[in-house]
Image (cartoon, rainbow, N blue to C red):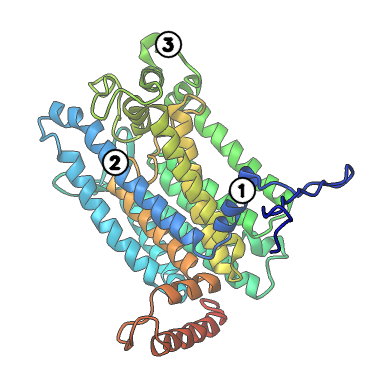
Amino acid sequence: MPGSRTGRPPVQRTVRRPAGASRPPRDNPVRRLHTRAQKAWDRPLTAYYLIFGGSLLITVLGLVMVYSASQITALQMSLPGSFFFRKQFLAASIGAALLLVASRMPVKLHRGLAYPILAGAVFMMALVQVPGIGMSVNGNQNWISLGGSFQIQPSEFGKLALVLWGADLLARKQDKKLLAQWKHMLVPLVPVAFMLLGLIMLGGDMGTAIILTAILFGLLWLAGAPTRLFVGVLSIAATLGVILIKTSPNRMARLQCIGATDPGPGDACWQAVHGIYALASGGIFGSGLGASVEKWGQLPEAHTDFIFAVTGEELGLAGTLSVLALFAALGYAGIRVAGRTEDPFVRYAAGGVTTWITAQAVINIGAVLGLLPIAGVPLPLFSYGGSALLPTMFAIGLLIAFARDEPGARAALAMRHPRFGRKRGARGSTFDRSPRRWNTMRRRASAARPSGER
């Protein structure tokens, strides 16, 4: 650069911008964060990680809260303080094995299990009513004793049976283009669902019947049921529900406890009110893990139906919002899997499982908050109870298998996890990269084939 006459470097003058010229837009951090979040949501493996990670966190946190909420109950029953935790941990271990098996099974095998699971569930639910085999717990005749302290509730497996069998049935009818006729849409799906509901209501379990009804309506909605047909089936179910509630003083008492702030005469709303007390005393960050007061005999079913109240007391608003966020993420991932697939069975099954878990979580949390009547259903993956945990974890395995089966997810998993036994050259060499690229493209080509359809 040539110097000036004085020997000093020339002064560079800033060029003034005309008055009417527009300035370049600044980088908005909020917009940049929104763009990154949107890209993260659109990644092929987002649903896979949300389902796997969300269900794992819910289960682990549930084990911690079961241990905390059940200690006093176990000691009052002259049992070791970790009695219920050990049983729940055993059920979670078996459920984890079922989850891994279900997540690795092909869609065709899932469809093949639909009828055997339905037949087994119906047989066990009928076996409950046989004297000497079925047993009553809290007034509901819906349990079978397995010896010792182990029991099983067959109606919990009825949810899984309805999801698999209903999804397979609707997928077959859609392949034959029969769902346009309302007779084929209702028969035999609705009669079989009503048969399961009848077997459940013989034992008096209204809560499980409500979840099964929600699954039925979810399948009909996914199948594209017309509004008149949908409203008709809903009206029949609502009428039967009103009759069952009116004819039961216990159910009428539960309905009257919605929004109650006082136990009332005869302490009819004792459980609902003390659930609110537990949530109210938790504050923002809670009283500390294990420091609940309501679990010392004041709150019935603290480790089962009302474990969310103990969570609010010990972990506060932050803990309860975390649980809600995990269930919301799980529900979003299930809806995404059902919406992005081209396989009708995957769409119906994923939608049915998502309806099942979401509806059960809403009913349980709504009862604890005093917004819904106490239905006696556990919080999925969170409350104590192996009979509810095992089929739910198998259903989560279904969602994971469906999320892995997406073409984009297949390709992404193939790039991250190459097949074992392939020789590798030096890091960064062409010999190391080219076989992986060829293997990835081959898996992408095979992923485009439809799977699980008959």
How many other residues sit within 10 Å of disc 3, few (<14), some (14-19) or many (≥20)?
some
Q: Earlier in the sequence, mark 1 or mark 2?
A: 1
Q: Are marks 2 and 3 in contact (CB under 8 Å)?
A: no
State how far apart marks 1 and 2 are (Cα): 38 Å
Dot 3 amino acid type: Asp
Q: Position of residue 126 (x, y in %)?
A: 36, 53
Q: Quadrant of residue 71?
A: top left
Residue 141 as seen in the image, left or right of residue 443: left
Residue lying at the far top in this picture: please name it.
265
Q: Secondary structure at mark 1?
A: helix
The label shown at residue 384 is: 2
Residue lying at the far front in this picture: please name it.
6
Task: Name which residue lies at 51% across and 33% down.
Answer: 244
Q: Which residue matches tag 1?
A: 34
Q: Which residue matches tag 3?
A: 262
- 85 vs 225, nearest the viewer: 85
Q: Quadrant of residue 420?
A: bottom left
Task: Name which residue lies at 61% across and 48% down.
Answer: 34
Task: Name which residue lies at 44% across and 58% down.
Answer: 49
Q: Secondary structure at mark 3?
A: loop
Which marked residue is nearer to the observer: mark 1 or mark 2? 1
Q: Earlier in the sequence, mark 3 or mark 1?
A: 1
Q: Earlier in the sequence, mark 2 or mark 3?
A: 3
- 148 vs 452, nearest the viewer: 452
Residue 397 as seen in the image, left or right of residue 302: right
371 relative to 184, above or below: above
Residue 212 as seen in the image, left or right of residue 70: right
Q: How many marks?
A: 3
Q: Secondary structure at mark 2?
A: loop
